[in-house]
Amino acid sequence: MVNSSSSGNEPGANPPSRPTIRPAQRQHPAPQAPGNSPYPGPVDTAGSGDQPLPSRRELRRREAEAAAAQGQPTAHYSDASDMYADPDYSGVESGQATQAMPPAHQGPPPTRREQAATRRKRQPVEREPLGPVRGTVRTFGELCITAGLVLILFVVWQLWWTDIEANRDNENLADQLTEDWANQDPNELPDDPDEPVVADPVDKNSAFGIFYIPRFGDDYYRTVAEGVDLEPVLNRMGVGRYPNSAMPGEVGNFSVAGHRVTYGKPFNKIANLRPGDEIIVQTKDGFYTYTFRNFDIILPDAVEVLSPVPDEPDYKGKDRILTMTACNPMFSARERYVAYSELTDWTPAKDGPPKSIKDSKAYDKVSKNGGA
Amino acid sequence: MYGFIWRLLPGNWFVKLIFALILIAAVVLLLMQYVFPVIAPYMPFNNATVTDGGQ
């Protein structure tokens, strides 16, 4: 500190360029070198105005050797800062040395090259050690970021990828179903032409019909399977039929459930249904046309909506009803949206599809397979 | 953590990058194919049915 203050007085007298210091300082190298060697720190070298340059260079060499031998990072830091500090301080120190410009240029460059070389070598050594605290904090931060990314990925998967998968499954299943139908004989028609054939019950988790709902889109069709388990029915097979409810065409309540969001969202637009809208269910035997009547919003445990006369579990009923349930509001499990429909028409398979879906893209696509 | 993985990967930076991308793809596939389908039923927005117990 004493040195630096003394050097601080000098610059006012002489403001020459940096390199000039060094040669001047060289003039008395011998006495200074031994005095400096025990304190190789940046303060010393930078601050002392009367310090000779050659000794500094020697010092650095010695420092570098010592540091290399011991592997002390502190030595490198001081070395590096020295190099940057040098020019600034040299301007301050330069008061003494105005004469010896030329040799100065020869002096410093090798030093810098050396330093640069040593720095390059040492860099990885400096970087690697990360204290236990900083290491823990960094790892914790990285884990947090990872958790955030995983959550985002989950949302993407849930909202986007499940739809893609379920739609693909839906198409494959519908193709398979119509192929099967083409190889099976339909049930015998009842004597009364107005009376629909009651579809045969099927095994759990197997598909037995296809829903067409023109209100949901011209190309809308979803397979309907037995059971209301998430896997595999609701998540991969479209709509699921409540076990023990009526089959299509049967007197009673043909009740189905479907996702309103995600997994192909078969009932996404269930709230768009208007009284009079047709819901057509195709089975091996033909087409059942249900007409939408009204909707309700209920609590998740209101199973009475599945009874033959909804909300009146004690009555047997004589109508053929279709009840569709989906979650409400969207993305919530708090309530259920229920849509009630009534069978209003029926067409045997041999008579072809009803007018409302005859020219639709959905029926085109399904029937292309040579199915019913 | 990521620095550690990066250092474990062999080769120069380009090879490392390819390995890293493969690793990321593998993790994403694992999550989407096996982990998320297990978690999804516990999420509160996938219930479409009415049942005796609710939910």
Image (cartoon, coloured by chain):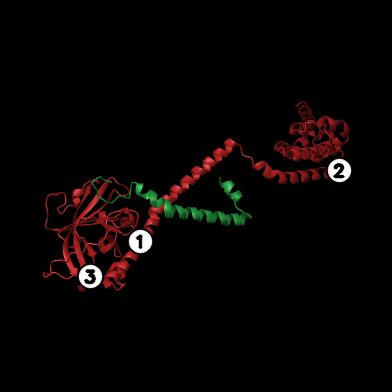
Q: Is residue A14 left or right of residue A312?
A: right
Q: Which quarter of the picture shows residue A58?
A: top right
- Of the 4 image quadrants, the one containing the N terminus of chain A is top right
| Amino acid type at image mark 3 | Pro
Of the 4 image quadrants, the one containing the C terminus of chain A is bottom left
* Three-letter amino acid code at the position of disc 1: Asn
What chain letter is assigned to the residue under label 2? A
Is disc 3 surrounded by few (<14), some (14 to 19) or many (20+) residues within 10 Å?
many
List x then y, in percent, for residue A44. Answer: 77, 31
**On screen, A23 above or below A217?**
above
Mark 3 lies on residue: A353
Amino acid carrying mark 2 in the image: Pro
Q: The chain coloured red carries which letter?
A: A
Which color has been applied to chain B in this rendered view?
A: green
Circle 2 residue: A103
On residue A167, which mark appears? Answer: 1
| Chain under disc 1 | A
* Label whose residue precedes the other's in the sequence (2 or 1): 2
